[in-house]
Image (cartoon, rainbow, N blue to C red):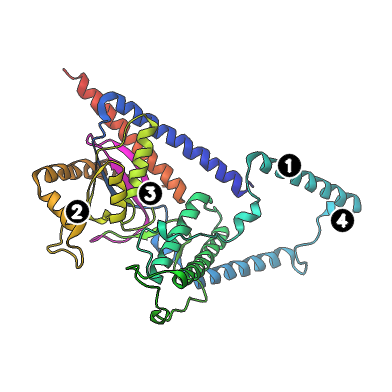
Amino acid sequence: MPDHSTIAEFRCRHERALGEVFSGVLGICSRAGLGSIGIVAIDGTKFSGNASINANRDYGQIAREILREAGETDAREDELYGRERGDELPEHLRTREGRRKALREAKEHLDCEREAELLTGADDAEEGEQLLQVDLDPEHFVTRPSGRRAWLREGRRALDNEREKQARPIPHERTARLFDACRRLEEELENQHQANTAYEAWRARGVAADGTRRMAPGKVIPFELPVAPTGLMNLTDPDSRVVRTHGQAPKQGYNAQLAVNEQQLIVAAEITIDSPDFGHLQPMVNATRRELHAIGLEDPEVVLADAGYWHQRQMEQIVSQGMTVLVPPDGGLAKTPRAGWDGGPYAFMRQALRTDAGRALYRHRQITVEPVFGQIKFNRGIRRFHRRGRAACRSEWRLIAATHNLMKLHTHRLAAATP
């Protein structure tokens, strides 16, 4: 059975191949006249995964299922072997010559595996079984680095990013998935302890949010970390999460993100495991720039997104790169501004969206990215992923995006050929 490094290497090659397919299709569409990148609209939709929401279990339930399956295995072995334990030496190992031959073959097999790992640069397989370690840097936090809750949340985000980079395959056997789910929950508990320790160290040497004085240790609210892992883990697809949309039933799946140009051509496709779109504006802009640069195109001039993407620091960084950002600070149903969301950039953005030019630009969001989701989910009937695991679902999502672009290219050429 191949180890994790071999499977991860195969997945990387698969990702690169799909990336080349997506970039190739995007380049063809661009040369055909569909690649105008003046305006890019970003949005996300919730996609069901290849897993049931009823397959979520907590740590205690997973432990009980492991013990129950172990008991069933013992009962089956008792039926097969009777009084024997079932671990007796096989016939070819009961002699000295047989044992020497088996040890010699095992040593040769280990030598071959070590040579293969040195050639591929892979780490030892045992390292993949260790709990993941994450480093927290307040400068890269999505939310403000103040408060223990923010550090715990950012620690979990960093853990999810490390899991995405590692791209461990989802085991096929249920027993293996049970142990994998157990390991993930233990990783999350260890991650909480790491994030809490990092927060305490930061608070000991940090300053207040206004930068005027050191943190007052007397204001710390008593906090006690859980002893056992908390939360739920899906036994079918541990990478998936329960994602929610207002007014709809929750789904076990992913938040699929798209960046679409004025011709409804998809220029970037990514997936996240977070229900809200908050914090994903800059990653989607970076993905868009990466895809455009791969086919020799410049950055977009205007980036549009709905109120869920409002993130002041990310918007400022995007503007510093020479792009205009239009993101309303208020949702469509909001009648009054949120408390504290007035003045400064909030007032500036509201005023910009009230102008004729601002309204005309922002109107492109509704007529570009929204119809693409309608085409994929309702016209083509693609409403769920068929593969399991974040890396596999990302590959599937990019394949869906590439086929959408091919259909746009086909329609464009048919329209051009019609007299």
Does 265 appear in magenta? yes
Mark 2 lies on residue: 328
Between the residue at mark 2 and the residue at mark 4, the CA separation in whole angstroms equals 76 Å
Residue 369, quarter of the rendered image: top left
Mark 1 lies on residue: 112
Between the residue at mark 1 and the residue at mark 2, the CA separation in whole angstroms equals 59 Å
Mark 4 lies on residue: 94
**Which of label 2 and label 4 is nearer to you?**
2
Disc number placed over residue 417 in the picture, else none: none
Between the residue at mark 3 and the residue at mark 2, the CA separation in whole angstroms equals 23 Å
The reply to whether discs 3 and 1 touch (Cβ–Cβ < 8 Å) is no
The reply to whether discs 4 and 1 touch (Cβ–Cβ < 8 Å) is no
Please give the range of residues in magenta: 246-271
**Which of label 4 and label 1 is nearer to you?**
1
Q: Residue furthest front?
A: 212
Q: Amino acid at mark 2?
A: Pro
Q: Secondary structure at mark 4?
A: loop
> If you read the primary sequence from the N terminus, does the residue marked by circle 3 or circle 2 appear first?
3
Mark 3 lies on residue: 271
